[in-house]
Image (spheres, helix red, strand yellow):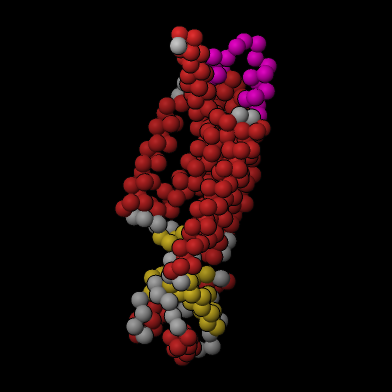
Amino acid sequence: MILKHFDFIKHRNIFFTISIVITLLGILSLFIFKLNLSIDFTSGTRIDVTANQALSTTKVEQTFTDLGYHTEQTVQSGQNNRVTTIRLNRELNRTQSATISDRLKQDFGNVDVSMSTVSPQVGRDLAKKALYAVIIASLFIIAYVWIRFEFLQGLTAVIALLHDAFFIITVFSLLHIEVNILFISAVLTIIGYSINDTIVTFDRVRENVKLSKKRLTTLSDFGHIVNQSIHQTITRSINTVLTVLFPVITLLIFGSESIRTFTIALFIGLLCGVYSSIFIACPLWAVLKVKHLARRKKKRTVQPQA
């Protein structure tokens, strides 16, 4: 494997630059295109129409147009596309819901109609709780890695995690893929998966630091340890992500439309997670570690003069 002899520290600036460019692209994309939020995070109504056979989405949208409603999105899912989901950007009262249900049954025969409505307040609360979940998870990760290893490793691990999460958001923004509650589940899943991969590498770093017979002070010293540790764990990292990617790809191909957001986010996150664990977390730790030691040395030198 070519990466078994790759110098990750020597080429660190290339990967740091790639990540910075992707981050800036994500910020620009969010500013211009924003996220395609589902009614889980905005106000609106979701209507599921289940029929004995696939319905024409054009005719379904025409029915809503005749009733004076603008459909934000119309997708089909389920076996043989028998479920048609319509998204409206407004809340419906009982009278409006009954009118729509009756008209759908009139136009398309014996269909089952179910509706779910989310108010603006519920959408804002859900988005806020999702953000809190990511922040709390990140704080616990820093605390755990700080206790188990050291603070700088906890910090770089969380930077790598946020890098992964933001990369997923960037792709969803650029491709305008709908973001629903399953998206948050996928992001939290990737956070858990990615930190596991990073901790395995950091654990090997710690072992190699203990086994080192020289005092580590320069980037070259820490770079040797990082390269050695990554080389020792890279095969495990790649094999692990491949075994997880296979079922995710299967779900992407054969899975239901209702979990499409989840599987797409998982697929992107898994690839980005193994990338950040190998090319971002450990090299960044080495750079920060050297700077931290340099500051401590400078502080000890200045204090006696005072």
Compared with 254, 100 (above or below) is below
Magenta span covers which residues? 203-224
Q: Residue 248 or 218: which is nearer the viewer?
A: 218
Main secondary structure type of the part rendered in magenta? helix
Q: Quadrant of the C terminus?
A: top left
Quick check: 121 left or right of 214? left
Q: Quadrant of the N terminus?
A: top right
Q: Residue 171 or 254: which is nearer the viewer?
A: 171
- Give percent across and percent down for residue 91: 43, 77
- Give percent across and percent down for residue 17: 39, 32
Residue at image coords 43%, 31%: 16
Residue 39 visible in the snapshot: no
Q: Residue furthest front?
A: 306
Residue 137 visible in the snapshot: yes
Quadrant for residue 38, please give it.
bottom left
Q: Residue 135 or 278: which is nearer the viewer?
A: 135
Compared with 215, 8 (above or below) is below
Q: Residue furthest top?
A: 305
- Give percent across and percent down for residue 188: 57, 50
Quick check: 75 left or right of 202? left
Residue 220 drawn in magenta: yes
Q: Residue 231 or 28: which is nearer the viewer?
A: 28
Residue 200 drawn in magenta: no
- Give percent across and percent down for residue 76: 49, 71
Residue at image coords 42%, 26%: 13
Residue at image coords 35%, 76%: 70
Residue at image coords 68%, 16%: 211
All told, the count of numbered labels is 0
